[in-house]
Each structure stands twice: as C-alpha cells, then as structure tokens.
Amino acid sequence: MTRLILARHGQTDSNARRILDSAPPGPPLNALGLAQAAALGERLRGERIDVVHASVATRAQETATPVAATRGLDVGVVEGVHEVFCGDLEGRADDHARERFEAVYAAWLAGDLGAHLPGGESALDLRTRFLPAVEEITDGVDGTVLLASHGAAIRLASAALLGDTAETTYVPNTGLVILTGTPATGWTLEHWDTAAPVVGDVTAGGPAD
C-alpha cells in the first residue's frame, strides 16, 4: 500500500500579485513562502515519508526541501507534474486575463475537461502528463511518497486519481491532499486541506501557479 502526499508549493511574489505564472522553472519562494515551506517541514516531522519528489518548478523544489532535509533525503525532480500551462495568459494579472482563465477553470470543474486555455493546456492535457508521472513514482512503493506540485495541477490530477467521484476544493499554499492506494488498485482520499495553513496570509494566490 502506498500513501501519496500531494503538497502545493509555498507562496511566490507572483502568487501575491495574482499573476498567472505556470511556465517552469518560474520564480522562487518569497520570504513568506520560505516560512511556509519550513512550517510544512515541521507539520510533517512526525509522518513517515520514504521518498520526496517535486516538479521541475523552483518553487516546488524549495517547498519540498525542508521535508526532505529532516529525513536525510534528496528531492527527486519529476517531469510532467508542473502547473497547467496558461499559454497566451502567461505572466498576466489583468482582469481580462483572470476572467478568461477562471471561465476555463470553471468549465473543467463542471466536467468539460477538454476546454483549453487560449494557447495553453486543457485539464485532459494536464492529466495526460501528470497521471503517468504519479504512477512511475508510486509503483511498487510500500510507504509514503511526498510530491510537491501546484494548485490546479493537484486538484485536477487528484480528481482523476479518485475516479472523478470526490468533490474537490481549492488547495492553499503548502496545503496537502493525501491519497492511499496503488496505481493498480486505485486511490482513496485520506485527507484534503480545506483551509489555508496558519503561516501568513495566503489568500492572494490563484489556482494556476
């Protein structure tokens, strides 16, 4: 049996400014984000974690580092689990760009997984690259795997891993989604953070960062 802990990265300046920032490697954590990552390490100190991975984005790797460091582990960098690509909206924070993104995001949550961001990805595109990566890092692991990834990516991929049967919610900075199971037998939901962690004000971040 495998336990998969999906952790969203800590805050970046792009989060604080509500910039649609999806292309890796992306910005590093800001001061608050580094504090959140340290707090995540403390939160998980008592948990058994056997393997630590992160996306190719700098912010995800920095978030995973405190968790790995307390266990003497390396952070494995995994292709395919970075944020859903915003395409023509990348780097923008204006009202029109946010509205276009949120309209497509709402379509995904309503079940239209093929809806595309302009010049970017669909939820199906995200799942096509994310799910095989999860299978690769969890296959044959009898223990706990932590993967530091991104808000929209975690929400969309978790829904797929759960067979689109669970109601999903926004994942805050350093929020956790915990699944148990195996790639072969399927996954069940153990825990989903429904409120932001207590380190700072993290309500400014958007779903794609």
Image (cartoon, rainbow, N blue to C red):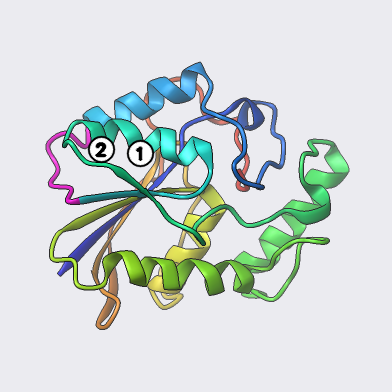
Q: What amino acid does circle 2 point to?
A: Ala
Q: Can residue 199 be seen in this view?
A: no
Residue that sits furthest to the right in the current view = 96
Relative image position of residue 70 (x, y in whole percent) = 19, 31
Relative image position of residue 49 (x, y in whole percent) = 18, 48
Nearer to the camera, 103 or 56: 56
- Secondary structure of the residue carrying numbered label 2: helix
Relative image position of residue 46 (x, y in whole percent) = 12, 37
Quadrant of the frame with the C terminus = top right
| Circles 2 and 1 in contact, beta carbons < 8 Å | yes
User: In 3D space, how far apart are the residues under numbered discs 2 and 1 (Cα atoms)?
Assistant: 6 Å
The answer to if 45 sits in the magenta stretch is yes
Residue that sits furthest to the bottom in the current view = 184
Name the disc covering residue 10, or none.
Answer: none
- For label 1, the crowd category at 10 Å Cα-Cα, with few meaning under 14, some 14 to 19 and many 20 or more, is many
- Residue shown at 21% from the left, 37% from the top: 44
Relative image position of residue 31 (x, y in whole percent) = 49, 16
Q: Which residue does the numbered mark 2 point to in the structure image?
A: 68
Nearer to the camera, 74 or 164: 74
Left or right side of 65 for 21: right
User: Range of the magenta residues?
Assistant: 43-50
Name the disc covering residue 64, or none.
Answer: 1
